[in-house]
Image: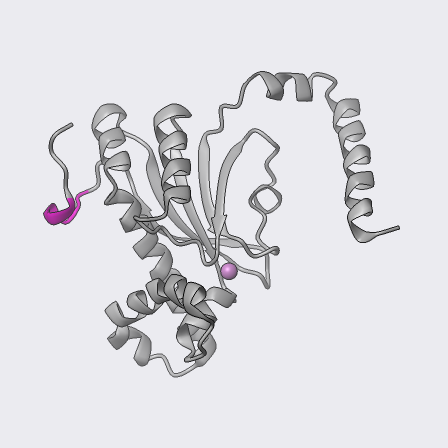
């Protein structure tokens, strides 16, 4: 059997199990999704949103990219954000990074990964530059990487708050709250590192007033 065929076989068994537990499960979900959470996570195969939060299909709307970055020219991320915030009206947006992130490590190195990856990872290098003093004082390389992972998550949450999508929702419905989390590959535990409740103060330079 090919490896991918195992996936299809396992899928059949899973669907069967779900129906045995809850005969209406798929029918209910196929009619409607009303997740409370938008998850922006790393593409890393070891950080699957549903498994690590013990949630079911239908509970989390998910976007994943390398190193869980929020980039204001990323049409993919912005359309997910707009759909989740404006149409699904999620109550929480979670940016979840993870310790041991290959994207963060790559950005800290001087390796040339080719133009496309260089362009993506440069966003993390910028976070490093903005926090150079703190980071350069951490002599242990793993600890420095971990700290950059946390600082990057903070930056991504703040970038969410700088979008007109979030600001408009904050004005109109006092939500969603924004959360920055970091997952530990070694222990499976999520460390909440940052939070911006709806209508948290912003640098006025980034505020929009005409909603
Ligand atoms: Co990663």
Picture quadrant of residue 14: top right
Q: Residue at x 25, y 41 (%)?
A: 163
Residue 158 in view (yes/no): yes
| Residue 205 covered by magenta stretch | yes
Q: x, y (%) of residue 147?
A: 39, 68
Give, as a single range, the part of the protein colored magenta.
Answer: 201-206
Q: x, y (%) of residue 177?
A: 33, 37
Q: Does residue 56 sit above or below 112 in this rendering?
A: above
Front residue of 140/108: it is 108
Front residue of 63/111: it is 111
Q: Residue at x 89, y 50 (%)?
A: 1
Picture quadrant of residue 173: top left
Q: Residue at x 79, y 40 (%)?
A: 8
Q: x, y (%) of residue 197?
A: 28, 39
Q: Does residue 15 sit above or below 42 in this rendering?
A: above
Q: How many marks?
A: 0
| Residue 82 covered by magenta stretch | no
Q: Residue at x 59, y 64 (%)?
A: 186
Q: x, y (%) of residue 9?
A: 83, 39
Residue 198 in view (yes/no): no
Q: 109 left or right of 204?
A: right
Q: Does residue 209 sit above or below 40 in this rendering?
A: above
Q: 15 left or right of 120?
A: right
């Amino acid at each position: 059997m090919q490896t991918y065929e195992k996936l299809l076989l396992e899928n059949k068994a899973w669907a069967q199990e779900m129906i045995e537990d809850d005969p209406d499960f798929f029918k209910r979900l196929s009619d409607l999704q009303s997740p409370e959470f938008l998850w922006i996570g790393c593409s890393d195969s070891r950080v699957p949103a549903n498994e690590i939060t013990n949630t079911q299909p239908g509970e989390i709307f998910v976007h994943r990219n390398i190193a869980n970055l929020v980039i204001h020219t990323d049409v993919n991320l912005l359309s997910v954000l707009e759909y989740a915030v404006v149409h699904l009206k999620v109550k929480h947006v979670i940016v979840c990074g993870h310790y041991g992130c290959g994207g963060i490590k790559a950005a800290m190195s001087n390796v040339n990964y080719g133009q496309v990856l260089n362009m993506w990872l440069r966003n993390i290098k910028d976070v490093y530059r903005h926090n150079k003093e703190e980071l350069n004082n951490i002599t242990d390389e793993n600890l420095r990487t971990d700290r950059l992972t946390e600082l990057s998550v903070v930056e991504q949450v703040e970038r969410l708050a700088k979008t007109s999508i979030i600001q408009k929702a904050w004005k109109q419905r006092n939500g969603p709250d924004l959360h920055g989390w970091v997952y530990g590959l070694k222990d499976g535990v999520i460390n909440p590192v940052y939070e911006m409740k709806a209508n948290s103060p912003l640098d006025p330079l980034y505020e929009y007033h005409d909603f």
